C-alpha cells in the first residue's frame, strides 16, 4: 500500500506527468468519439492518419516554442516570433518567385539562407533592446511584433505571393521514409536545440540567469551575452517555422503567416512546465505542450465545431494550467486539503525557514 | 524629558518562528518627549519587536499598552490610526506622486468625492512648515533627495496625530548634512511631546540624539539605560556580548608571525577604494596565506568593502594591484579571472540558484569562467562535486537534489564549494557562519584554517569577534562606514580591544590606558 | 545646512521632464498635420479631423480603459476580443428580437464582468496579467465564433439612428454620436484619474505597489477595478463599433489590442506604470488616426506602412522614456 502510494507520488511528481496525462486523455477521448482516430494507413508509400496529421501540423509550433522556451527560461518573453515567421516566409517566397527556375535547389537554398539571415538580424535587434539597452522584454519585442507585420507586407507588397517550387513545398508537405518531412525537421531542430543547450553549458547558464540573475552575476556569468543569444535563437527557430508555414500553402501572406503563434508558443512552453518567471526549462515538456495544443485544434475540427471556437477550450486550458502553477492557488488548495486529515500530519511538514 | 507615565509599554513579549526564538520575554517602554534608541546586532530581534508592536506579527506572549490601555494591532494601518506611525529605512512612498499627495493620499480633503487639490496643497505646506521644510509641494517626490523623501515620510507619519513615531534605520543612506537636518526635526518633534523610537547602527548618532537606549541580544533584553550613563564601550560590549567558546576543536592558529606572511609582494593591494553612500575610501593589502578579519557592527560597511573588492559594486576611484601589477576589479567576472571568490552574506538572494541542483550550483562559477562553449565534462563535474560533498560533509550527499531542499548550513557549504572549485587565490567570506548550526560552523572555521595553511588568502567577515580573532592574522576594524584600524592579531589583541576600537573609532586611545 | 539651500535646485527641472512625452506627441501630431496640410489641399478641411475622430472613436474609448490598466503597471490583451464579443452579442440579441435598451444593458455588462473576473485572477492568485488577459482574449474571441461563424447585420432602428445621426455645423462639417460618447468617456476618465481617490490610487500602485500597500491604500480593490474599467471601456467600444459597422462580425478588431497599447504608449504613458495622462492617450489615438489619413491621402503608400510607422514610433517613444529617465522604480 505504502509502496504503491510512493510510486504514485513519484510518478505524479514528475514534471512531464500532467502534460502527458492531458495529452493521453485527449487522445483517448478522440478514440472513443471516433474509433478510427488512431488508425494509420499506408497509401502510396506515405503514412496517413490523424496522429500523423497532428505531428505534421504541430511541427511549426514546436519549432517556435523551442526558441520561446529558452527566452522564457531567461526570464523574458518574445512576442515577435509570429512577425518573424511572416517576414522569413515572405523573403523566401519573394526571392523564389523572382527566379526563372523555381524548382532549382540552389535557388531554394539561397532563399532560405537569405531569410534566415534576416531573421537572425531581427533576433539580434530584440537581443540588443533587452540585453544591452535594458528594455523590458515584453515591450521590446512588442515593437517588432507590430512593425514586423508591416515589414512582411512591405516585402510582399501586400500581395499573397504564390510560388511553384517543389523543393520549397517539400519543407511543409514532403515525405521522408513514409513520414512527413516536417516531422523530421521539427525533430532535428529539437535535437539540435537540446544538444546546443545540454551538451554545452548554455542550458545551465540560461537557467541560472533566469533563476537568480544577481547570484549569477556574482558567480561571474556575463548574462547579457546569454540573453542576447536566446533571442537570436528564438528568431532562428521562428524563421524555420515560417518556412514551413509558407511551404504548407506554397504562398506567403504577410498578414496571416504565424498569426497568434506567439501566444500558442507561450502556452506550449507554460504547459510544458517551464515557469514564466524564468529558471528551469523543459524542452520535452514544451514539445508535449505543442502537441496538446494541436490535438485540441484537431479534435475541435473533428467534432465539427468551428475552429475559432477552439479558442474557448484554449482559454480554459490556459487558466487551468496557470492556476495549477500559481503558488497562491496551490497554497489555498493544499491548505484546504491539509485541514481535512487529523492534525498529526502537520508534523510531517518540512521545517520552514524563517528569515532572521 | 518628562518623567510622566510611559506612553507605550511592552511587557514580557515573546515570539517564536518554527525553529527560531526571535524574542523572549522582552520588556520595552517609551516615554513621551524622548528619543529612545533600540540597539542590537543582526538577529537581536529589533525588527521583530517593531513588527510585533505595529501588528505585523502576533505575539506568543506578552502585553502592549498605549497610554495605559491594552492594545493589539492587526496591522500597521491600525497602528497608524491609533497614533503609532512607522517610517522605514527604504522610503515607502510613491516617488511618481507629488509631495503633497504623498503626505495625504488616502486621507485627502474631498468635496463630493472630488479631491480638493488646493486644500491638500495648503495643508501640506502648513505641515511641512511645522517641520521647517520649504518644498514645492506639487513637485514629484522623486525630484527630491532621499533625505527630503525621508522627511516627507515623517510628515505623513505625524500628520495622523502620531504619539509614537518609529524610525527604522532612517539614516542609513543619508550623508552628514542630511542626518543633521533629520535630527533637527526629530528634536523638534520630541519637544512637541512625541515619543520617538529610533533604530540605527551608528553609535555616534545614538549618542548625539538618544535620551535612552534599550539593548537586545539574541532575542532577549539586555537592559535599558540612560544614554548619559552608558559609555560607548559598554554599549558595544552589551550588543556583541561575550560568547561562550563552544568551538574548542580549533586551535588558535592565527597567532603566527604576521611579519613572515607579509614579506614579498601582496596578492591584492587596494588603495583608496570607496563608494559614495556605501563606504569611505580605504586601503588594504592581503598576502597569500593570510586571513584578514573584518570586524565591525552591522551596517558599519563590512559587506560594502567585500563587494568593492569583488567588483560587485564599482569603486568610485582608487587603484588596485594584483601581484604587484596595476589591475582593475570592475565586474565579478573580472575579479574571478584574477582569482577572487566571494560568498555573499545574503545566501538566498545573491548566492544559491534555488532551482538548480547541488552539482550545478557548485560548478557554476567555474563554468562561468570557462564560458558556455566549453562545458566541464560530466566525469570531471562528478569528480569535483563528489570530492567537495565529502570534504565539506554536505547532507544530503545526493548532488542532484535541488539546492533549495538543503538546510542553510549545507547551502552555505555548497557556496563554499562553488568557490573552492575555482581554486581562488583570495576568498572573501561574508558572514559564512551566520544562521547555521554549530557543527557546520566549526567545520567552516576549520576549513578556513586549512585553506590559509595551503596558501589561500581569505577575507573573513563576521559579527562574532571571537571567531574573527580565532581565525585572522590581521583584523581590519570598521566603524560608521570607515575602516578605522588594521590591527595585527598578536598576543595583545583581544575582543576587548577590538570593541574599544569599534566604540571609539581609533585604537590609539588604547595605548593611553 | 538649511533646507532652503537643499531643496529648490533639485525640483527645478520638474515641469518639462514629466511632460516631455506628451509634449513630444503633441509636436509630432502638429508636424504630421502640417505635412498633411502642406501636401494636400483637402487636408485642411475641418471634416478631415472630424473623420479621424469618427473613424477612431471606439479605439479612443478602448485606449482610455487600457490607460487605466497600464498606469497600474499591468496590461490587458483581451480588449480587441471583448470589443468584438460585445458587438457580436448585441447583433445576435437584436436579431433574436430583444428590445434595444435591454440589449444595450446586457452588452455593457458582459465586458466589465469578464474584466472583473480577470482582475480577481490577477489579484487573488497572483498570475501575470499578460497570461490572464491572454486567456480572456481567447475566451472572448471563442465566444464570438460560438455565437456565429459569420457576420450578423444589425437592422434595429435605434442602432441605425445612432449610426446615421450627424451632428454638425451649417457648413456641412459633422461628427457622429459615437464621437460625443467617446468625448464623454474621455472627460469622465480624466476626472476620475485626477480628482478621485480611485484615480490617485491607480497612480500610486503604478509608482510603487509595495509602498501603496504600506500607505494603507486598497491595492487589491484598485487593481481589480482597473481591469473592470478596461472591460467596461471595451464594451462601450464594442457598442460604438457596432454603431459604426451596423453588424457584429466574429473576426472584427483582431489585433486591436496592439493598436491600443501603441496609442497609449505613444501618448506618453509609461508601460511600467505610474505616469501618464488621458489627454496623452487622446493624442496617441489621434497620431494613429492621422497616420492612416496621411497614408490614405497619399495613395501611393500602402496600408502596411501604418504598422511600420507605428512600430518605429513605439521604439522612439520607449527610447525617449528611457533617455529622460522616467523610471521611478
Image: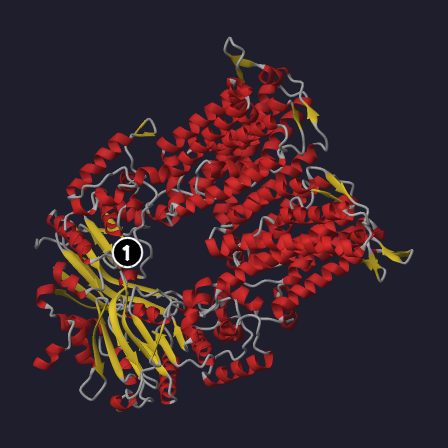
Horizontal arrangement in the rendering, residue B156 relative to residue B187 (left or right) = right
In this picture the colour scheme is secondary structure
Answer few, some or many: residues within 10 Å of disc 1's Cα (few below 14, many 20 plus, some between 14 and 19). Answer: some
Could you say which is closer to the camera, residue C241 or residue C216? C241
- Vertical position of residue C187 compared to residue B461: above or below: above
Could you say which is closer to the camera, residue B278 or residue A342? B278
Horizontal arrangement in the rendering, residue B146 relative to residue B452 (left or right) = left
Residue B225, how many percent across, how many down? Answer: 13, 65
- Vertical position of residue B368 compared to residue B262: above or below: above
Could you say which is closer to the camera, residue B49 or residue A19? A19
Residue A335, how many percent across, how many down? Answer: 50, 57
Question: Which residue is the site of mark 1?
Answer: B89
Could you say which is closer to the camera, residue B107 or residue A3? B107
Horizontal arrangement in the rendering, residue B64 relative to residue C91 (left or right) = left
Residue A326, how many percent across, how many down? Answer: 53, 54
- Residue C117 visible, this angle: yes
In this rendering, the count of numbered labels is 1
Going by the picture, which residue comes out furthest to the right? A44
Residue C216, how many percent across, how many down? Answer: 34, 44
Task: Find numbered disc 1 in the image and state the secondary structure of the residue it sits on.
Answer: loop
- Vertical position of residue C106 compared to residue C24: above or below: above
Chain letter of the residue beneath label 1 in the structure image: B
- Residue C282 visible, this angle: no
Amino acid at each position: 500500500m505504502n509502496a504503491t502510494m510512493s510510486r504514485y507520488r513519484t510518478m505524479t511528481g514528475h514534471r512531464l506527468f500532467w502534460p502527458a496525462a492531458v495529452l493521453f486523455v485527449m487522445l483517448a477521448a478522440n478514440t472513443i468519439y471516433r474509433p478510427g482516430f488512431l488508425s494509420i494507413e499506408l497509401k502510396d508509400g506515405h503514412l496517413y492518419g490523424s496522429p500523423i496529421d497532428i505531428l505534421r501540423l504541430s511541427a511549426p509550433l514546436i519549432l517556435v516554442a523551442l526558441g520561446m522556451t529558452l527566452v522564457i527560461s531567461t526570464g523574458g518573453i518574445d512576442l515577435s516570433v509570429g512577425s518573424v515567421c511572416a517576414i522569413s516566409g515572405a523573403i523566401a517566397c519573394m526571392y523564389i518567385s523572382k527566379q526563372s527556375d523555381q524548382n532549382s535547389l540552389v535557388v531554394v537554398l539561397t532563399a532560405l539562407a537569405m531569410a534566415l539571415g534576416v531573421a537572425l538580424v531581427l533576433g539580434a535587434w530584440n537581443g540588443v533592446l533587452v540585453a544591452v539597452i535594458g528594455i523590458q522584454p515584453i515591450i521590446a519585442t512588442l515593437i517588432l511584433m507590430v512593425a514586423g507585420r508591416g515589414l512582411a507586407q512591405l516585402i510582399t507588397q501586400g500581395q499573397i505571393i504564390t510560388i511553384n517550387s517543389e523543393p520549397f513545398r517539400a519543407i511543409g508537405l514532403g515525405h521522408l521514409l513514409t513520414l512527413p518531412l516536417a516531422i523530421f525537421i521539427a525533430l532535428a531542430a529539437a535535437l539540435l536545440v537540446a544538444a546546443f543547450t545540454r551538451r554545452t553549458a548554455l542550458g545551465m547558464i540560461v537557467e541560472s540567469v533566469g533563476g537568480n540573475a544577481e547570484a549569477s552575476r556574482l558567480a561571474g556569468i556575463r548574462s547579457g551575452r546569454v540573453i542576447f543569444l536566446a533571442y537570436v535563437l528564438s528568431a532562428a527557430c521562428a524563421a524555420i517555422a515560417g518556412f514551413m508555414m509558407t511551404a504548407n500553402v506554397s504562398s506567403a501572406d504577410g498578414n496571416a503567416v504565424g498569426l497568434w503563434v506567439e501566444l500558442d508558443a507561450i502556452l506550449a512552453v507554460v504547459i510544458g512546465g517551464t515557469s514564466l518567471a524564468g529558471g528551469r526549462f523543459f524542452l520535452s515538456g514544451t514539445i508535449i505542450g505543442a502537441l496538446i495544443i494541436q490535438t485540441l485544434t484537431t479534435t475541435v475540427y473533428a467534432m465539427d465545431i468551428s475552429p475559432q471556437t477552439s479558442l474557448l477550450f484554449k482559454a480554459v486550458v490556459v487558466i487551468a494550467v496557470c492556476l495549477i502553477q500559481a503558488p497562491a492557488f496551490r497554497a489555498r488548495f493544499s491548505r484546504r486539503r491539509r485541514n481535512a486529515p487529523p492534525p498529526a500530519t502537520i508534523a510531517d511538514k518540512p521545517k520552514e525557514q524563517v528569515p532572521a | 524629558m518628562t518623567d510622566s507615565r510611559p506612553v507605550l509599554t511592552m511587557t514580557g513579549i515573546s515570539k517564536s518562528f518554527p525553529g527560531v526564538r526571535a524574542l523572549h520575554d522582552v520588556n520595552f517602554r517609551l516615554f513621551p518627549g524622548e528619543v529612545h534608541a533600540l540597539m542590537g546586532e543582526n538577529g537581536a530581534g529589533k525588527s521583530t519587536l517593531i513588527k510585533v508592536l505595529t501588528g505585523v506579527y502576533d505575539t506568543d506572549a506578552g502585553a502592549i499598552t498605549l497610554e495605559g490601555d491594552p492594545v493589539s494591532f492587526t496591522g500597521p494601518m491600525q497602528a497608524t490610526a491609533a497614533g503609532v506611525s512607522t517610517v522605514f529605512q527604504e522610503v515607502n512612498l510613491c516617488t511618481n506622486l507629488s509631495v503633497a499627495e504623498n503626505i495625504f493620499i488616502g486621507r485627502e480633503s474631498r468635496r463630493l468625492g472630488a479631491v480638493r487639490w488646493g486644500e491638500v496643497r495648503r495643508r501640506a505646506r502648513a505641515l511641512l512648515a511645522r517641520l521647517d521644510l520649504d518644498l514645492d509641494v506639487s513637485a514629484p517626490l522623486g525630484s527630491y533627495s532621499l533625505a527630503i523623501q525621508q522627511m516627507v515620510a515623517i510628515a505623513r507619519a505625524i500628520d495622523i496625530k502620531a504619539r509614537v513615531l518609529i524610525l527604522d534605520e532612517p539614516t542609513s543612506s543619508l550623508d552628514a548634512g542630511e542626518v543633521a537636518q533629520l535630527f533637527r526635526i526629530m528634536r523638534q518633534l520630541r519637544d512637541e511631546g512625541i515619543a520617538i523610537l529610533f533604530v540605527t547602527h551608528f553609535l555616534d548618532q545614538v549618542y548625539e540624539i538618544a535620551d535612552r537606549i534599550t539593548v537586545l541580544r539574541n532575542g532577549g533584553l539586555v537592559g535599558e539605560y540612560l544614554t548619559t550613563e552608558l559609555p560607548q564601550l559598554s554599549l558595544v560590549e552589551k550588543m556583541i556580548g561575550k560568547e561562550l567558546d563552544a568551538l574548542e576543536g580549533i586551535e588558535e592558529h592565527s597567532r603566527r608571525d604576521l611579519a613572515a606572511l607579509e614579506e614579498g609582494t601582496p596578492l591584492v593591494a587596494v588603495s583608496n577604494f570607496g563608494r559614495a553612500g556605501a563606504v569611505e575610501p580605504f586601503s588594504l593589502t592581503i598576502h597569500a596565506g593570510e586571513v584578514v578579519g573584518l570586524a565591525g557592527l552591522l551596517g558599519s560597511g563590512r559587506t560594502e568593502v567585500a563587494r568593492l573588492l569583488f567588483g560587485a559594486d564599482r569603486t568610485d576611484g582608487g587603484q588596485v594591484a594584483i601581484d604587484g601589477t596595476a589591475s582593475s576589479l570592475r565586474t565579478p567576472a573580472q575579479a574571478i579571472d584574477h582569482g577572487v571568490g566571494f560568498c555573499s552574506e545574503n545566501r538566498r538572494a545573491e548566492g544559491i540558484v534555488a532551482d538548480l541542483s547541488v552539482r550545478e550550483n557548485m560548478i557554476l562559477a567555474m563554468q562561468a569562467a570557462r564560458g558556455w562553449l566549453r562545458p566541464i565534462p560530466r566525469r570531471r563535474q562528478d569528480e569535483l562535486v563528489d570530492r567537495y560533498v565529502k570534504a565539506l560533509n554536505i547532507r544530503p550527499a545526493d548532488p542532484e537534489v535541488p539546492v533549495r531542499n538543503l538546510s542553510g548550513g549545507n547551502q552555505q557549504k555548497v557556496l563554499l564549494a562553488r568557490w573552492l572549485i575555482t581554486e581562488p587565490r583570495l576568498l572573501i567570506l561574508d558572514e559564512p557562519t551566520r544562521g547555521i548550526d554549530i557543527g557546520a560552523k566549526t567545520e567552516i572555521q576549520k576549513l578556513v584554517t586549512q585553506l590559509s595553511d595551503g596558501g589561500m588568502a581569505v577575507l573573513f567577515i563576521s559579527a562574532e569577534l571571537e571567531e574573527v580573532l580565532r581565525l585572522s592574522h590581521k583584523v581590519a576594524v570598521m566603524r560608521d562606514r570607515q575602516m578605522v584600524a588594521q590591527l595585527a592579531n598578536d598576543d595583545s589583541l583581544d575582543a576587548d580591544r577590538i570593541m574599544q576600537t569599534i566604540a571609539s573609532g581609533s585604537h590609539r586611545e588604547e595605548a593611553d590606558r | 545646512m538649511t533646507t532652503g539651500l537643499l531643496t529648490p535646485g533639485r525640483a527645478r527641472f520638474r515641469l518639462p521632464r514629466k511632460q516631455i512625452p506628451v509634449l513630444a506627441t503633441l509636436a509630432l501630431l502638429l508636424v504630421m498635420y502640417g505635412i498633411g496640410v502642406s501636401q494636400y489641399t483637402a487636408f485642411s478641411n475641418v471634416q478631415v479631423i472630424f473623420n479621424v475622430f469618427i473613424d477612431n472613436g471606439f479605439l479612443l474609448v478602448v485606449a482610455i480603459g487600457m490607460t487605466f490598466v497600464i498606469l497600474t503597471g499591468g496590461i490587458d490583451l483581451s480588449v480587441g476580443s471583448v470589443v468584438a464579443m460585445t458587438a457580436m452579442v448585441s447583433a445576435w440579441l437584436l436579431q433574436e428580437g430583444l428590445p434595444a435598451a435591454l440589449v444595450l444593458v446586457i452588452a455593457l455588462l458582459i465586458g466589465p464582468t469578464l474584466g472583473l473576473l480577470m482582475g480577481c485572477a490577477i489579484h487573488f492568485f497572483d498570475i501575470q496579467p499578460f497570461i490572464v488577459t491572454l486567456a480572456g482574449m481567447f475566451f472572448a474571441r471563442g465566444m464570438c465564433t460560438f455565437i456565429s461563424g459569420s457576420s450578423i447585420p444589425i437592422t434595429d432602428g435605434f442602432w441605425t439612428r445612432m449610426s446615421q445621426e450627424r451632428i454638425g455645423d451649417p457648413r456641412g462639417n459633422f461628427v457622429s454620436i459615437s464621437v460625443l460618447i467617446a468625448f464623454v468617456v474621455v472627460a469622465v476618465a480624466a476626472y476620475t484619474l485626477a480628482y478621485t481617490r480611485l484615480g490617485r490610487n491607480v497612480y500610486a500602485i503604478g509608482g510603487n505597489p509595495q509602498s501603496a500597500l504600506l500607505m494603507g491604500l486598497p491595492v487589491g480593490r484598485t487593481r481589480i477595478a482597473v481591469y473592470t474599467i478596461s472591460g467596461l471601456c471595451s464594451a462601450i467600444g464594442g457598442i460604438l463599433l457596432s454603431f459604426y459597422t451596423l453588424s457584429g462580425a466574429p473576426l472584427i478588431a483582431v489585433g486591436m489590442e496592439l493598436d491600443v497599447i501603441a496609442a497609449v504608449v505613444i501618448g506618453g504613458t509609461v508601460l511600467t506604470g505610474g505616469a501618464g495622462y488621458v489627454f496623452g492617450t487622446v493624442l496617441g489615438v489621434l497620431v494613429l488616426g492621422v497616420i492612416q489619413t496621411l497614408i490614405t491621402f497619399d495613395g501611393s503608400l500602402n496600408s502596411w506602412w501604418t504598422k511600420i510607422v507605428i512600430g518605429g514610433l513605439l521604439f522612439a517613444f520607449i527610447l525617449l522614456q528611457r533617455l529622460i529617465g522616467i523610471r521611478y522604480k
